[in-house]
Image (tube, rainbow, N blue to C red):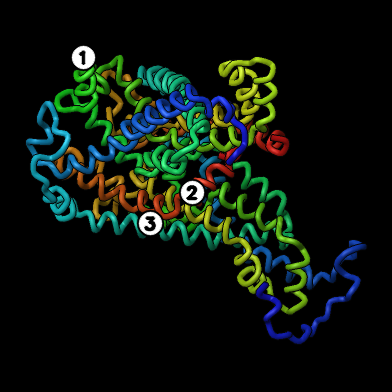
Amino acid sequence: MKTASKPAVPPPTTVRPVEAPRPGPQRPPLRRRLADQSRAYAFLVGGLLCFALFSWYPAIRAVVIAFQKYTPGAEAEWVGTENFTRVFHDPEFTAAWRNTLTFTLLALLIGFAVPFVMALVLNELRHAKAFFRVVVYLPVMIPPVVSALLWKWFYDPGAGLANEALRFLHLPTSNWSNGADTALVSLVIVATWANLGGTVLIYLAALQSIPGELYEAAELDGANIWQRVRHVTIPQTRFIILMLMLLQIIATMQIFTEPFVITGGGPENSTVTVLYLIYKYAFLYNDFGGACALSVMLLVLLSAFSALYLKLTSSGGEDS
Amino acid sequence: MSTRTLVSPLTLARRRGKTLYWTVFSGIVLLFALAFLFPVYWMVTGAMKSPDEVTRTPPTLVPDKWSLTGYTDAWDLMDLPTHLWNTVVQATGAWILQLVFCTAAAYALSRLKPAFGKIILGGILATLMVPAQALVVPKYLTVADLPLIHTSLLNDPLGIWLPAVANAFNLYLLKRFFDQIPRDVLEAAEIDGAGRLRTLWSIVLPMSRPVLGVVSIFALVAVWQDFLWPLMVFSDTDKQPISVALVQLSQNIPLTVLLASMVIASIPMVAMFLVFQRHIIAGISAGSTKG
């Protein structure tokens, strides 16, 4: 400890009464309390200001602007629920929500089952563990913009690697991100490739915490591998599965980079997502009222999932 | 290490088990190499092909002639030094400000018993429930015209730095860590006459090295990887970080140059990962329930 080597400092002039700290909540004099408070707030003020400006204020403001006609520089004007109805009647609105929900669902199916199976298999391997961990996490460290551009190139109808691979396997080629019916799935594949490393690692950690005796007992009862997965592994990791599912829903519903970079929302609006539409309202249509109305909708939906997530982590976190 | 998993060691020790294990093992190695390493290899070598080789079908697995012009062109034509430098400035500033302000605030909330501390902490934790991207538009309006002082932080690194401080997750991580520091240690420092700042600097921070490392990595990675927020903040091309510049410039440059720029943009994060991989992987695994 560093304190031990420090030269003895003479006691401060205002010697604290020995009985002060612990037992009775005897209040120290006002001047001292004020001094303590101002010192505490000196430490707090920078962070507090940032939260006030960039978290609390925007959250309130989103709700306010959602009911205003708002363009920067001009006087804001109250318009009631007009923004909501206007946004609602935009044909892109339905497309954006449908795409976002489909994307989330597909990402759950693909981006969820694949990492689980991967972790399950990796956990059985006795060699080169470090190699697998590094390799699976590598795409996560590649900037999302780079992953998106990389896959855009793979999906290229001409010299793209994706079709080249299909040809190599003598399979029919696909339009990938250029086809209205395949674009969304193509984006799910990119997002899964880029993000599954983290999920795999978390699953691996969860799998390693399962007591081996459970498997032993199951095996003695004659359970085969599939039954062991079904009755030991899954119940034991249920909590983590649920947590990651919620996190995944929250994350994928905010998808933006992949559609913006790879497809630009097309073809035929098949990859416009809610966040992309928010971006369009603000920066293409200069309609901040509409953008905030959409933001509030997204906010309400996602906060419900976040609240559930936080509730579960704070209540179930300790015993698992 | 030796804990029992799904498949018992006994099964693996048998001859059939052994063959099966090695078959699966090689299959997985192959799959991982193909799925995760090959795309990276393809990008790195694609940048070294000639402009018409890179668009040739069927593609060549190894460049006919290795050339570094893609990389040198990217460096000069795309103005990569500027954009890389912008990214470094943005990430470093966000990191330092986050460390300073979040640590100070967490220390205050954890140890100094400020009035309304519980309410403030509650307000900070409540922001964890608000998904960041859903608020980018009102946040943009705030940054474009700060309340009361009416200045704009657009096209200014402060527009990245200050909002980065409002990171409830990192602040909470720090606060929880500070909560665990035994009271006696801090009281001993106080009796020795150390002030609040002194205690924080010479006692609390040295003890918090692990958590500071985790927060640092989170902070740096978050800024480096972000796209939507810098896209909004920096309309001025010269100020853009590499992620935004790449997308803006991707339309009208030769493919090999774009690929080379993508590789260069990835190097810092990948290098950091390879250096700190143990810590990063351990951090992810340990924080499993907190994501």
Which quarter of the rendered picture does the N terminus of chain A lie within?
A: bottom right
Query: Is B210 or A259 nearer to us in this picture?
Result: B210
Viewer-side label of 2, 3? 2
**Viewer-side residue, A172 vs A63:** A172
User: Given contact means CB atoms under 8 Å apart, are the residues at marks 1 and 3 in contact?
Assistant: no
Disc 2 to disc 3, C-alpha distance: 21 Å
Numbered disc 3: what chain?
Answer: B
Are the residues under badges 2 and 3 in a single subunit? yes
- Label 1 crowd bin: few (<14), some (14–19), many (20+), radius 10 Å: few
* Subunit bearing disc 2: B
**Percent x, y of residue B185:** 74, 68
Q: Is residue B172 visible?
A: yes
Q: Which mark is residue A170?
A: 1
User: Is residue A78 in view?
Assistant: no
B68 displayed left or right of B231:
left
Q: Which mark is residue A184?
A: none
- Of the numbered discs in the image, which one, if any, rests on residue B90? 3
What subunit carries mark 1? A
Residue at (47%, 35%) from the top-left corner? B134
Residue that numbered label 2 is attached to? B280
Q: Secondary structure at mark 1?
A: loop
